[in-house]
Amino acid sequence: MCDWCIKHGEGKLWYLNAKNYARKMYRERKRAELTGKVEFDPLKLIMEQLENALKYYGTERWPTIKKQIENFCHAVHFGQVVPLEDLKAILDIAWPIARITCACRRMVYGLEDEENFYCFGIGVGMYKWERWPENYRGGVEFISPDEAKRLVEEFNKKGLVHTIWVFGTPYIGGICNCEYPVCLGIRNRVDYGIKILLKGHYVAVLDPEKCNGCRRCVARCQFGAIKYSPSMNKVVIDMKKCFGCGLCVTACPRGAIRLERREKFPAIANDW
Amino acid sequence: MPIRIEVDTEKCGNAMECKICLRVCPQRVFMMFPSTYEKYKLSERFYIRPVHAVACVLCNLCVEKCPKGAIRIITQ
Ligand code: SF4
Ligand code: SF4
Ligand code: SF4
Ligand code: SF4
């Protein structure tokens, strides 16, 4: 169990607990905003703090600065990797669901709005999207859970990692479909080790007998966890690097990879 | 080698109308931010920041391709 399951899961995976999407949480977030505890725009706030923090990367002060920025993220805005099946379960409990443009792809790739509908805003907060048009450049489109599931399947085929994001912990307000290096969650985690994006509750396990060395899984891994060995003509998965996104599983033509719960492996059970 | 990247936002103008540096940098060093952030309003201007400067490999593409000569790379 991760910290968020302990605090907000009520015996379930925290992101499958409907309370973390409920109106009450939204009200609490509003209250926090009013009392000045949480700024109105977590994203902008985090971006500024991250940029400032990165100036110290590689210096003596980095470990302290990194810890500070992580604490801040965990209180306000952080994400976790979820595999496709769990994401579909989320789409059954989160309501409403709206297609929105991806802020990272706009800021990093400069993608135009029309080609940038990669994310979902979820929860009743979305009904008030027009208050913050800059966050929702390109507008929003409310869709049914079935339509959302169809879209995430498409994103999965493309090779995008599914992540959920809190806006004022533990209110889950966003679902993204990400790739390195454009996703600032993945980039800050992989390049600088900042735990703004947490590993998921699963880990990929390979059955070497079944693997024929086709390497399809290697190209799907955004976290560099899969290596191909030419002399063995098989892959190996580094479970310490694996984020449990499941993209390699859905790509393997031989069914050689499966996802297992992280808890089963003591050395990585608490490695988020 | 410590690298400093400077973007002259005056010279750049409205980055939303160009975005060339975002597209050419192989290391995705740059990010584009809205200059204003207000309720009920879209930002009209955007500016560039070299957020991931530590990832720069000194290929110099950004300096060469920027149509306004707004990017400088300083190695110390
Ligand atoms: S996709 Fe499957 S069969 Fe192909 S290399 Fe990866 S694990 Fe082996
Ligand atoms: S090894 Fe597979 S499950 Fe793990 S991060 Fe890479 S693609 Fe995702
Ligand atoms: S010199 Fe090359 S790597 Fe460095 S910022 Fe410019 S385009 Fe990017
Ligand atoms: S290439 Fe130059 S002018 Fe164009 S957005 Fe970048 S800094 Fe501005």
Image: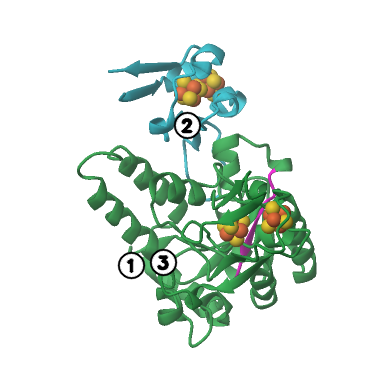
Chain colours: A green, B cyan
Q: Residue sitting at 63 percent across and 50 percent down?
A: A232
User: Which residue in the protein does label 2 denote?
Assistant: B29
Q: Residues within 10 Å of mark 1 (few under 14, many from 20)?
A: few
> Can you give x and y, in whole percent of width and height, for residue A54 in the image?
34, 41
Which label lies toward us, 3 or 2? 3
Residue A271 numbered mark, or none:
3
The CA distance from mark 3 to mark 2 is 29 Å
* Circles 3 and 1 on the same chain: yes
User: Which residue in the protein does label 1 denote?
Assistant: A35
Residue A261 is left or right of residue B8, and the answer is: right
Q: Chain of mark 2?
A: B
Q: Chain of mark 3?
A: A
Per the rendered image, the range of residues in magenta is A116-123
Q: Residues within 10 Å of mark 2 (few under 14, many from 20)?
A: many
Q: Does mark 2's beta carbon lie closer than 8 Å to ligand 3?
A: yes
Under circle 3, the secondary element is: loop
Using the rendered view, name the quadrant where residue A40 is placed.
bottom left
Under circle 1, the secondary element is: loop
> Can you give x and y, in whole percent of width and height, for residue A189 in the image?
44, 51
Under circle 2, the secondary element is: loop
The CA distance from mark 3 to mark 1 is 34 Å
